[in-house]
């Protein structure tokens, strides 16, 4: 258990104040102990994976940040994989494609943990995490482990039931299908992303949800906002739906830039953009 942990070290954005308490958990028992610690201290807790899609404010988080590092991978039967919530989602997409299984090729290049991908119902290239998800192992705030089938849960565009459930995702089970083209499709996806997205920059991934029948990045680019800066935060010159931490950006810089983008796009196209980044706490 660490105190006063810099949150900038825990997110892909490299932004944030301090966490009053911080710990990593590698087993279910670790996770139970961490949640018990928070309850005994009467403080809130947040579960974090790779820290993508998240923007921590510049202030102190007066609670416990639990980094989920439960990262096992087991093939229960051909095409059925049981995966720890702390396992790399991108690595899962790569490994399953290498074995000739289709359904998670899109995960390659998504900087999330499996738990984070389930929580946000992460998606790309017309596919979503929930498409191949069979069940989720979930620890409620009372310390009870439950296995929830997908039909017991609700998923939609970048949302899931877990965003309103207190507790923590422990693992997920995915059912994939055999495909001779899985590996080539996965390589094609990762190659395209490296060419079109700012992989070398600190960012939280795509900032805005895609409006119906349109693309947020396209609207932002058409409004002439590529390269626009507020403080150290900048609209990526490679992909306009990314805000990058160009030079010691603060959360305040990012939030101001988000609002500026919304206003400019609304004035230009009449479309109201909606942010999909989690603002924490």
Image (spheres, rainbow, N blue to C red):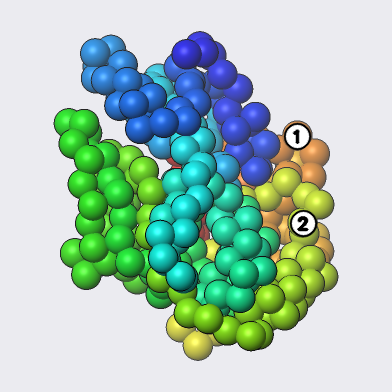
Of the numbered discs in the image, which one, if any, rests on residue 248?
Answer: 1
Q: Is residue 232 above or below residue 155?
A: above
How many residues crowd around disc 1 within 10 Å: few (fewer than 14), some, or many (20 or more)?
Answer: few
Residue 26, x across and y down, in percent: 47, 30
Give the SS element for disc 1: loop
Identify the mark nearer the N-term, 1 or 2: 2
Q: In the rendered picture of this protein, how many numbered marks are placed on residues? A: 2
**Residue 265 visible in the picture:** no
Q: Nearer the viewer, residue 126 or 201?
A: 126
Asked if residue 20 lies left or right of residue 217, the reply is left
Residue 12, x across and y down, in percent: 65, 43
Whole-angstrom CA distance, mark 1 to mark 2, is: 18 Å
- Disc 1 to disc 2: CB gap under 8 Å: no
* Residue at image coords 66%, 69%: 98
* Residue at image coords 67%, 36%: 14
Q: Nearer the viewer, residue 128 or 89?
A: 89
Of the numbered discs in the image, which one, if any, rests on residue 199?
Answer: 2
**Residue 111 visible in the picture:** yes
Residue 25, x across and y down, in percent: 45, 28
- The C terminus lies in which quarter of the figure? top left
Give the SS element for disc 2: loop
Residue 191, x across and y down, in percent: 79, 72
Q: Is residue 264 above or below residue 275?
A: below
Asked if residue 52 lies left or right of residue 43, the reply is right
* Residue at image coords 46%, 70%: 78
How many residues crowd around disc 2 within 10 Å: few (fewer than 14), some, or many (20 or more)?
Answer: some
Q: Nearer the viewer, mark 1 or mark 2?
A: 2
Q: Nearer the viewer, residue 107 or 249?
A: 107
């Amino acid at each position: 258990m660490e105190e006063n942990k810099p949150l900038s070290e825990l997110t892909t954005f490299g932004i944030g104040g301090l966490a009053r308490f911080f710990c990593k958990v590698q087993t279910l028992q670790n996770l139970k102990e961490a949640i018990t610690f928070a309850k005994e201290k009467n403080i809130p807790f947040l579960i974090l994976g790779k820290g993508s899609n998240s923007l921590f404010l510049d202030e102190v988080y007066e609670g416990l940040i639990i980094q989920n590092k439960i990262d096992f991978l087991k093939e229960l039967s051909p095409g059925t994989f049981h995966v720890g919530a702390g396992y790399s989602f991108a690595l899962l997409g790569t490994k399953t494609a290498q074995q000739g299984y289709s359904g998670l090729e899109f995960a390659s290049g998504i900087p999330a943990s499996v738990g984070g991908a389930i929580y946000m119902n992460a998606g790309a290239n017309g596919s979503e995490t929930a498409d191949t998800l069979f069940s989720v192992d979930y620890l409620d705030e009372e310390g009870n482990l439950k296995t929830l089938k997908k039909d017991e849960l609700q998923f939609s565009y970048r949302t899931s039931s877990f965003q309103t459930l207190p507790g923590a995702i422990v693992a997920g089970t995915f059912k994939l299908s055999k495909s001779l083209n899985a590996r080539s499709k996965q390589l094609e996806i990762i190659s395209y992303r490296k060419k079109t997205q700012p992989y070398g920059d600190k960012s939280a991934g795509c900032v805005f949800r895609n409006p119906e029948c349109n693309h947020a990045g396209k609207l932002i680019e058409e409004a002439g906002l590529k390269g626009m800066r507020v403080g150290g935060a900048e609209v990526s010159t490679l992909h306009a739906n990314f805000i990058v931490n160009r030079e010691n950006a603060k959360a305040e810089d990012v939030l101001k830039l988000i609002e500026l983008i919304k206003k400019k796009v609304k004035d230009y196209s009449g479309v109201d953009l909606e942010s999909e980044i989690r603002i924490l706490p």
